Structure formats: structure tokens, C-alpha cells
Image: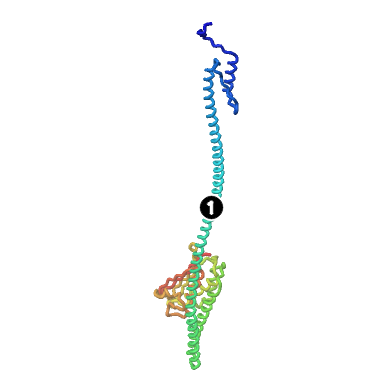
Amino acid sequence: MDPNYKSDKIVIEQKDIDEILAFCQQIKDEPQLGSTPIKVSRSNPLYDFSMELGKIKSEINGLRTKESEQANELNKSNIQLETISRQLKESIDESIQLNEELSCSNELLYQKNEMLEETREELLKLNLNLESLVDKRTKKLNNTINKLNKTVKELDRFVYSASHELSAPLKSMLGLIHISKKEYDHSKIREYLYYMEKTLYRLDDVTKHLMSFSKNNNLKLKKESFNLPDLVQSIIAELNPDPLKRSINFKIDIKSTQELYSDRYRIQTILHDLIDNSIKYRNENNTIQNIEIGFAQNGKINTLYVKDDGIGIRKQELPHVFQMYYRGTEVSNGSGLGLFIVKEIADQLNGEIAIKSKPGIGTEIFIRLPQE
């Protein structure tokens, strides 16, 4: 055979194939630590092919290295992520716990604020009540002091005037008795006895009013229901025991069934003094003396009134007639305590008193009392 002859055919033996297969298997499998790498001999017809496979192996090994590095990085990242996740979970748990604690604190704070607000309102109310109580007590104390001052002044005046009112008739009586002892003229003696009688009536009037004044100041109020016309009739019967000897026309303008709920004794004292004054200060120029006693209701106000056609009172005297021992007319046998006591009783019953009068025409007195 010609040594220069070249054939296009490649003869591949079984050992060459086995060598290539072993090399490929080595490429396929990951290299084991300490193993000897398989190399393809240059005489192997597939040597070039094996070289290409070797490049592919190198690339595969590089990819495997990168994959391993990436796996390590990913593992580290996962570990970091797990750490971060755990820390985040712990932070969330702490936040939830803090939120719950904050919510409880807020609730407690809200409750404390409500309690503080309620306490503040209660303190404010107590303060207002205390101020109101102090104000009321102060006013009550001032009223008591004023009443005491008034009582002391009235008591001083009362003692002085009472002693004078009692001593004057007694001195007059003693004087008349001394004169009578020396008198032999019976007509004169009868005249002295007449003056003595008038003086005794005046002394009796003063004594009764002093007793009424004392009783009114010391007797407690006692409210009860009573028939008003019957009370008026009993007063008229006491003051006018013999109607045939006195020309007095009493007019009672009250329903026969009219009941009044009040202090019976004090109402009796008021009407007794007012009717008694109308009789005392009658107009001698009138043949018949007219006295009207009436009662009226207006809403929640009861009004008692006494009207007469007596001598009347001058206008300038009217503001003073309710003062102790003040007499509104010169023609007077009274004690000067009647209208004063009437005014005191009206005040005790939380009522009001009003007077109208004209000289020579007569007098009207109204007592307005609240209904009970």
C-alpha cells in the first residue's frame, strides 16, 4: 500500500469507544474527592471530540461551582431571612403585647379620667352646696341677729312703755280714790266712779294686750281647720254682749260653711283686735255704727278684712299705726298694742297687712295669708 495514500475513513476501535464513554461518564458525574481524572489519549480518533467535551466539562464544573456558591449564598440568605423573620416575629409579638398593655393602660387611664371627672363634679357640687349652705347659714344668722336686735330693742321699749301704761292708770285710780274720800257730793262721787271705771277698762285692755303679746311670742304655731263664721260670731258676742244697748250693725260677708286652715288662736286674736278697734273708734255722729267682716279667696291667697265707718285715721299717721304703743288718733283709750300685735301675727303666718283710712269716713284693714 502506498504510504502517501490517505483514506477518508476513520477506524474506531472498541477501546477508543470505551475510553470516550468513561470520559463522558466522568463529565456526567460530579468529581469525587481524591479520584484520578480520566484523560483521552491523543491516539484516540475521538480526541478532538473529547477536548470539546472537556471544555463543556470545565463550563459545567464552573456552573456547578457557581451553583454551589449561589446555594451557599442562598442558604446564608435563608438563614439571615429566618433570623430576620424570627426577630420580626418577636418584634411583632412585643408590639402586640405593648399594644395590649397600652390598650389596658389607656382603658385604666380613661377610667381614672372618668373617676377624676366624677370626683371633680362631686367636689364642684359639694363646693356649690357648701357655698350655698354657708350663704344660707350666714343669711339665717344675720336674720337671727337682726331679729334679736329688734327683739332687744322692742323688749326695752316694751318694758319701759308697759311699766308706764300700767302705772299711769294706777296713779289715776289712786288720785280719784283720794279725791273721792274727801268728796261728799254724791253726783261728784258718781262722776269719779265713772272715771275709775274707764281707767279700769283701760288697765284691763293694756293687761289683755300684754298677755296676748307674750302668748303670741311664746306659743308655737298650731294649724287646724275651723269654721270661720262661728269664730267671728263668738268674737262679736264677747265684744258686744248686749246688742240692744249698742247701735252697731255687724255684717258678716262669709259663707256659713267656710272652713279655714290656720292657727285658730292667732286668727281669733287678729279679728278680735280689729273688731275691737272698730267698736272703740266709732264715729259718735253716726246713729248706727257699721262694721263689716269678710273673707275672700284669690288664687292661693286668703284675705280677711274688717271695714268700718268710724272716725278714721289721718294719712300721715298710717305708716306708723303698726308700731308698738303708737296711737293713730288723739281720741284713744287703747293700749297702742292692738295693731302692733296684729302685724306680728301676720308676719308669723307669712302674711301681709294693708290699711286704708280717711278721717270721718272709716277704716279698712286687710290681712292676706297664703293657703296651706
Q: What residue type is labelled 1?
A: Leu
Residue 304 appears in the figure: no
Q: In this view, does 75 lie to the left or right of 323?
A: right
Residue placed most toward the observer, 64 or 353:
64
Q: Position of residue 284 (x, y in %)?
A: 44, 78
Quadrant assignment for the N terminus:
top right
Going by the picture, which residue comes out furthest to the top? 1
Looking at the image, the residue that sits furthest to the left is 316
How many marks are shown on the rendered structure? 1
Tell me the residue at 58%/22% (across/down): 38
Examine the rendered structure and indicate whether residue 190 appears above or below residue 249: below
- On the image, the x and y values in percent for residue 92 come to 55, 42
Which residue is more in the foreground, 210 or 147?
Answer: 147
Instruction: Tell me how the rendering is colored.
Output: rainbow
Q: Mark 1 points at which residue?
A: 109
Residue 98, compared with residue 307, is above or below; it is above
